[in-house]
Image (spheres, rainbow, N blue to C red):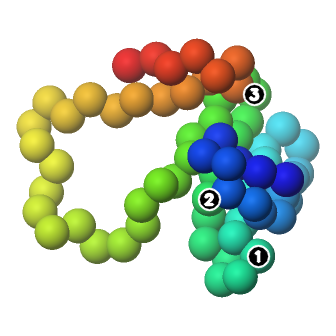
Amino acid sequence: MTDGAGRAGVAVQRGAQRYVLDPADGRLLEEASDGWRASHLEQGPAASAPATGAVVVAEAATGVAAG
């Protein structure tokens, strides 16, 4: 299985919730449930706090970006 970014992973699903994990190290690549999904492109500590009013972009299961 691949996530929204095209990375190969292993899917774990319970009911409507699905997680795609990196088989090499177990990192969470993507999570999805009931018509939405979120791909985790970066992971780790941030160098600074997010800017106030930052926009979060979510992608619906249909592949249409929303913001």
Q: Left or right: 35 with respect to 14?
A: left
Question: Which amino acid, mark 3?
Answer: Asp
**Tag 2 residue:** 29
Q: CA distance from mark 3 to mark 1?
A: 24 Å
Instruction: Say which mark, if any, is on residue 63.
Output: none
Is 50 displayed left or right of 45 in the figure? left
| Number of numbered discs | 3
Look at the numbered disc 3 and give the secondary structure of its residue: loop
Labels 2, 3: front one: 2
Identified by mark 2, the residue type is Leu
x%, y% of residue 4? 65, 41
Image position, residue 48 (x, y; %): 11, 63
User: Label 1: which residue?
Assistant: 23
Residue 28 position (above or below residue 60): below
Mark 1–mark 2 distance (CA, rounded to whole Å): 10 Å
Q: Work out whether 48 lies above or below 36.
A: below
Whichever of callouts 1 and 2 sits on the residue coming sooner in the sequence is 1
- State left or right for residue 39 relative to residue 24: left
Classed neighbour count for the residue bearing mark 3: other residues with Cα under 10 Å, few (<14), some (14–19), many (≥20): few
